[in-house]
Amino acid sequence: MRLLPALLLPLLLTIPTAARPPEPRKAVEAANGMVVCVSPPAAGVGVAILKKGGNAVDAAVAVAFAMAVTWPEAGNIGGGGFMMVAPPGKAPTCVEYRETAPAAAGPTLFADGRVTAYSHKASGVPGTIRGLALAHGKYGKLPWKDVVMPAVEMAEKGFTVTEGLSWSIAWVLASPTTTNAEFHRVYDKPGGGRWETGDTMKLPDLGRTLRLVAEKGADEFYTGEPADKLAAEMKAGGGIMTKDDLAKYQAKERTPVKTTFRGHDVYGPPPPSSGGTGVALMLNILENFDLKKMGRWSPEANHLIIEAMRRSYADRARHLGDPDFTTIPPHLTTKEYAKKLATGIDPTKATPSATVAPEIPLAGEGDSTTHFSVIDKDGMAVSNTYTLEHSYGNRVVVRGGGYVLNNEMTDFNPVPGVTTKTGQIGTKANLVGPGKRMLSSQSPTIVMKDGKPVLLTGSPGGRTIINTSLCVVLNVVEFGMPVQEAVDAPRWHHQWFPDVARFEGFSAHPDLVQGLTNMGHRISPSRQGDAHSIWVDLRTGRFHGAADRRIEGKALGF
Ligand code: DON
């Protein structure tokens, strides 16, 4: 790993993920298919599925299973996520496989501070396998077994450790929060020492779980031997999830949030993610201004971007949660509402966050997710984000099951009624409830032009995710940047509270920082997300894959 600026070091202590080549990458061009993801071996699996005649959903499902093996920091079968699918000639749909709270969970689960993020109680009921099965069953072409087996083989026979994985695994094994004996049994290097680039890692228990899923189907995970193992793990570790919770878990197909922006149609995941709504609301606000004319790095344009973020995140706190439990007001994505918010922005001065949602009483933040993008020769497109919440979730490996559990329950609002200036939210819409999905920020996005996908993007990064997707979409659609430049460009994050705008270009754009400070903004440096994206050149039909240089990653086309 290269030397990183000292100010990034505190972040790196909480966000692992390894070798981040600082040099710019080049977009990869191809005509017949493209996979862009964090894990090079998983990208290889996806392209092999495409070459075999699989479509983008087959490849995406195979990549998701492969990353549960090769990128355990966030790739998973013990977590959940959102898969946006654009079938050729049709509007995109959303396969939602967010985790749910177990039946025994109540609104005060975290309130007394005794349930920690690294405990069994922090796990929601995993959604990934039912989600991948739903997507595959409805939109895939190849047999189920064909898309799961590459992951089985890598886990059973072993796969080559990449530089990124070697750093990531060294980080988690050294972390004081990694105390789970099974985690160490599974991931410590046999014979001791550090996992090095080029080593072969075998994960036999995970191989067995995946083989059962490949041979018997997704239900096996929720009702068969793996479900018994998970229920036993919960019992032994003081968790509250039961076999009944597992059996009841359902993935859902939902209608995406859609908006228009400069002649494009933009689709993102609906609640229980706040991603699609957030991106749509911000684009709707920003289309009222000519940002391009102001200039990408002008204080005027970036002031408006920050103000749109501030307003959108206040509405996220106000209204968003699991739509099966909470009524989501329809005005959030209307052009009229966005225009009203746009009109309220002072073009010369920052709006204090405390005045944006004064009705929410104020009193006195997760690490890993991963996004990948896939497109096939027929233009079927997949934009998928899935997560364990923190890197390696709650750092618990299910005994004998070989996989890491999520700690997604920490995405619920922890203390009812307590919203703080530091960013903790306590509003009602996202309190813990039995069988409820916790609010997500995952924002896998598909931008269409004339009915064809033109941009696929998304990112990890907790609440910053929505703004990362926004920045990439703005960079391509508003500012006309080539996709790699759009992905590499410094990103902004403002989330209403804390009332600070975080900026990756803090050192590179001092005049901009000064200009915004003069307008009353507080700005701090940051590092934000990794957005593995695909842009389609609609004139030539060629795919341009951009792996984010902030992390290991691979754009692989053919
Ligand atoms: O679903 C969510 O919004 C969060 N659990 C995502 C966490 C995350 O992105 C952490 N990654 N860097």
Image (cartoon, rainbow, N blue to C red):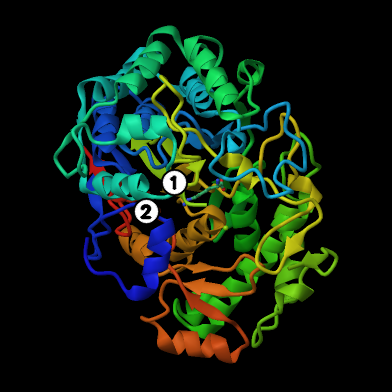
Mark 1 or mark 2: whose residue is earlier in sequence: 2
Asked if marks 1 and 2 touch (Cβ < 8 Å), the reply is yes
Residue beneath the point at 64% across and 49% down = 274
**Residue depicted at x 36% and y 22%:** 206
When the figure is inspected, residue 284 is found, relative to residue 322, above or below; the finding is below
Q: Is mark 1 within 8 Å of ligand 1?
A: yes
Q: Badge 2, how many Cα within 10 Å: few under 14, some, many 20+?
A: many
Please say whether residue 69 is visible from this viewpoint: no
Q: Which residue is the site of mark 1? A: 391
Q: Position of residue 203 (x, y in %)?
A: 29, 25
Residue 398 visible somewhere in the drawing: yes
Q: Is residue 170 left or right of residue 445?
A: left
| Kind of residue at badge 1 | Ser
Residue 141 lies, in percent from the top left, at 39, 18
Whether label 2 lies within 8 Å of ligand 1 gets the answer no
Q: Residue furthest right?
A: 359
- Could you tell me how far apart the alpha carbons at marks 1 and 2 are, in whole angstroms? 7 Å
Q: Quadrant of the N terminus?
A: bottom left
Percent of width and height locating residue 270: 64, 42
Q: Quadrant of residue 100?
A: top right
- Specify the amino acid type for callout 2: Pro
Left or right of 188? Residue 311 is right
In this view, the residue in front, 456 or 11, is 11
47 above or below 424? above
Residue tagged by mark 2?
16
Q: Secondary structure at mark 2?
A: loop
Instruction: Identify the residue shown where x is 54% and y is 48%.
Output: 443
Is residue 421 depicted above or below 87 in this figure? Answer: below
The quadrant where residue 463 appears: bottom right
